[in-house]
Each structure stands twice: as C-alpha cells, then as structure tokens.
Image (tube, rainbow, N blue to C red):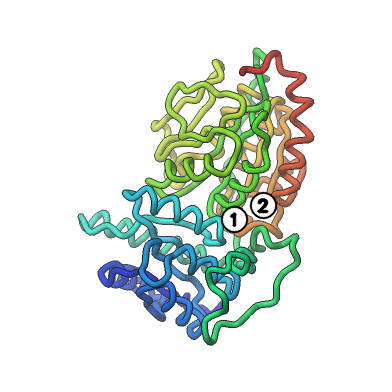
C-alpha cells in the first residue's frame, strides 16, 4: 500500500459524496481518487483506480451496495466501509448482509446538523478509513455463486482464489499494540455455582461476520447463556442483534438492565453502556466509571464481571479487533479456571485484541472460527454437568 491512502467514495447522493470527500481529504494522508453514483460505476472505477478503501452506500440505483460488495469481494477484494442510515431498518439489515458478504465495518451517513457533530464524525471517519486501509482482504466466492453479476467489470483483475480454509476471513497485517495496565488482583472464586455455563464473546472491527458464523453453528438446544460485546458504531447495535437473530437458532436481543441470563439466548451489550453480570445471574448496564480511551461497551469490564460470577463455568472468546480490550478480562477468566479461546491470526481482519490476550499467556487455544465452534461444543457438556441446574 502506498503512503497516501486512496479512497473511492460510492453514494447516490452528490451531497453525501461531497461531504465524505471533504472530510476525508482534510487529512493529508488520505486522497479521494474517485466518486461513483451507483454500484456499476463503482465496479468500473475500482478496476481502474485500485483504491485502498471503498466507502459504500447501501441503497443505490442501477446496482445496490450489497450486489456491488459481493462482486468486489469475488473479483477485486478491497476493504469496504459501509455507510448506512440508522433510521431505516431495511437499510441496516442490508448493511449487515454487506458485512456478511465481506465488507469490514459500518458507520452512519454523515450528519447535516451541528458543527460539533460534523467535526466528531470527520474524526471518526478518518480513523475508520485509516484502520481499514491496514487490512488485507481475501476473495469471497459468494459473489460468484449468486449469479447476480456474471462477469467482472472491464479492467477488473480476477485474483487467484485462496484455499477454502482461508475463505472465511482475511489475514491481518495490522494490530494496534498499546501498553496494558498493571493487572488487578484476581477476583474471588464465584459462589454459589451458576445454574448454567456462560459463553462471553468480545469482538471489534472485522468481528460481526465471525460472530454470525459462530452463532449460526450453535444448536437451538444450547445449554448455556451467551453474552456478546461487539464494538460497533452507535445506532447499529439493535440492527446487528436483529440480523444475528435471523441467522441463528438461538434468540438474540439487546440487553436491558436486570434482564436475566438464559440458556439458548444471546444478550448483546447496548450502545454506550458497559455490561456486567450480577450474582443473581442478571445483566447490569452501567455508564459511570468510564475511563478515557477505553471503548464502551468494554470487553474487559464484561469479562472481569463474568469471571467473578461464573468463574470456571465460563467459555471466553476473543475475536478480531484493534487494541487490547478483552486481554485483562480473559486473564481474570483464565485465573478462575474458565476456558479461553482466541481467533487465530490467519483468519483475523485485525489481530490486535486476540494478540494482546495471547501475549498475556491467558489463552487456552488459538483457533480459526470453525475450531472455536468445535471447542465450545466439546467443552459445554462437561460444564453443563457441573452446573447445579439448567434454567429452561
């Protein structure tokens, strides 16, 4: 990748295209090399300009964002940032279908309101584009199987297909490594024993598609509760929960304060709240105690709480993401005898979060997503037998 990040902006609105270009080019490290009004134009320009990152609208004439994403990931894999409205539920669902097709992240369309909101959005947009520009992506065969686009656009190179084992997610060359804080004292052993095991999953950029894959493989009779902390742009959590709910036999919902944990149910951490687990096996949402620079919801906060209540009855999973959120929580769960799993580098869009946990020496197994599923299903029967009862 060249020193300057080359971006292709794709949106049917000339106003949105102009705003995105202005925001992006306010950073000297970024250059918008082209702008497209629809997916067909995007395919042609992508083949000619070879951008490092593409921002992709959802609803467009001629060819929509989903079809365009499928085609690009089949014939010219490129990091794609989905730009979607949070106010239109069908658009949000399609945005997550685009993530499943190979796009890496999703953000809201730029605000047209106050200068402060626009400044905050510009900062966030630049940070996301720089992050995605550090990722390598692989070919997704889905775009070739759908038949919605028969041949690549003129000038679009057809890359060599990777072996099937690598098709689930790309290898990462990027990880943000920051100093970890001094480890706090290990939490006390949980008492009383929980009524069922808990699977806690932490993920960030590049994670939604892997989360979907894992949840889809888990059975409807899962004898465990699931807690998911996924870093994603504010406003998209509810849409993500609905999208996941449609792709798994489990029930998926956004967590609310004092909602009981239940088997066969996935509770998703809500926008802007840390999520904890109480001794009564309920979730608690918390806003106070925020530390500057730490994401919210925090994987560490959730996992450290889980360690205290579920202890050795926990399966902890850390997936793709930048930074080190989750490393301390994995350490606490590991110290209590919980089972800790990390996604391997070869299948991580961003290996930062798994790497941080692995380097602490608190991960029992480092596996690709299919291996994580197998490890969970292998471990659960023993944990279920050790539980005092299983809540229906």
Q: Is residue 350 visible?
A: yes
Residue at the location (44% across, 40% down)? Answer: 291
Q: Which residue is mark 2?
A: 355
Give residue 16's quadrant in the image: bottom left
- Residue 21 picture location, percent across and down: 33, 73
Give residue 189's quadrant in the image: top right
Is the residue 48 above or below the residue 346 in the image?
Answer: below
- Judged from the image, the secondary structure of the residue bearing numbered disc 2 is helix
Give residue 361's quadrant in the image: top right
The mark lying in front, picked from 1 and 2, is 2
Disc 2: CA contacts within 10 A as few (<14), some (14-19) or many (>=20): many
Q: Is residue 123 left or right of residue 192?
A: left
Q: Is residue 140 visible?
A: no
Residue at the location (41% across, 81% down)? Answer: 33
- Judged from the image, the secondary structure of the residue bearing numbered disc 1 is loop
Q: Is residue 215 left or right of residue 298?
A: right
Q: Is residue 101 left or right of residue 116?
A: right
- Residue 126 picture location, percent across and down: 40, 64
Q: Earlier in the sequence, mark 1 or mark 2?
A: 1
Q: Quadrant of the N terminus?
A: bottom right
Q: Nearer the viewer, residue 81 or 278?
A: 81
Residue at the location (67% across, 38% down)? Answer: 218
Q: Which residue is mark 1?
A: 177
Q: Quadrant of the C terminus?
A: top right
Residue 50's mark?
A: none
Q: Are marks 1 and 2 in contact (CB under 8 Å)?
A: yes
- Residue 290 picture location, percent across and down: 42, 37
Disc 1: CA contacts within 10 A as few (<14), some (14-19) or many (>=20): some
Q: Nearer the viewer, residue 263 or 127?
A: 263
Q: CA distance from mark 1 to mark 2?
A: 9 Å
Q: Residue furthest left?
A: 114
Residue at the location (58% across, 65% down)? Answer: 146
């Amino acid at each position: 990748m060249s020193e300057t990040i080359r971006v292709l902006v794709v949106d049917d609105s000339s106003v949105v295209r102009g705003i995105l270009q202005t925001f992006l080019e306010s950073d000297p490290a970024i250059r918008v090399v082209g702008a497209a009004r629809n997916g067909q134009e995007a395919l042609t320009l992508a083949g000619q300009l070879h951008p490092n990152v593409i921002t992709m609208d959802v609803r467009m004439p001629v060819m929509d964002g989903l079809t365009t994403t499928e085609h690009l990931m089949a014939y010219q894999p490129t990091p794609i940032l989905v730009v979607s409205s949070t106010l239109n539920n069908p658009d949000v669902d399609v945005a997550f279908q685009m993530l499943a097709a190979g796009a890496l992240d999703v953000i809201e369309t730029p605000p047209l309101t106050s200068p402060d909101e626009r400044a905050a959005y510009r900062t966030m947009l630049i940070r996301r584009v720089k992050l995605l520009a550090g990722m390598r992506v692989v070919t997704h065969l889905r775009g070739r199987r759908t038949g919605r686009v028969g041949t690549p656009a003129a000038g679009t190179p057809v890359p060599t297909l990777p072996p099937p084992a690598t098709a689930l997610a790309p290898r990462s060359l990027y990880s943000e490594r920051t100093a970890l804080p001094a480890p706090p004292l290990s939490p006390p052993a949980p008492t009383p024993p929980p009524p069922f095991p808990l699977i806690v999953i932490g993920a960030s950029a590049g994670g939604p598609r892997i989360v979907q894959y894992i949840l889809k493989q888990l059975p409807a009779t899962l004898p465990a509760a699931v807690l998911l902390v996924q870093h994603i742009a504010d406003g998209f959590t509810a849409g993500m929960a609905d999208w996941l709910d449609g792709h798994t036999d489990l029930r998926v919902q956004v967590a609310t304060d004092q909602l009981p944990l239940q088997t066969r149910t996935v509770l998703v951490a809500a926008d802007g709240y840390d999520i904890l687990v109480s001794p009564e096996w309920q979730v608690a949402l918390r806003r106070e105690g925020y530390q500057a620079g730490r994401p919210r919801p925090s994987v560490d906060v959730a996992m450290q709480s889980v360690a205290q209540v579920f202890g050795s009855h926990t399966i902890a999973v850390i997936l793709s993401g930048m930074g080190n959120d989750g490393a301390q929580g994995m350490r606490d769960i590991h110290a209590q005898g919980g089972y800790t799993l990390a996604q391997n580098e070869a299948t991580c869009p961003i290996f930062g979060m798994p790497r941080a946990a692995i380097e602490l020496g608190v991960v029992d197994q480092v596996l690709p997503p299919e291996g994580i599923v197998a490890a969970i299903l292998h471990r659960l029967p023993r944990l279920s037998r050790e539980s005092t009862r299983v809540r229906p």
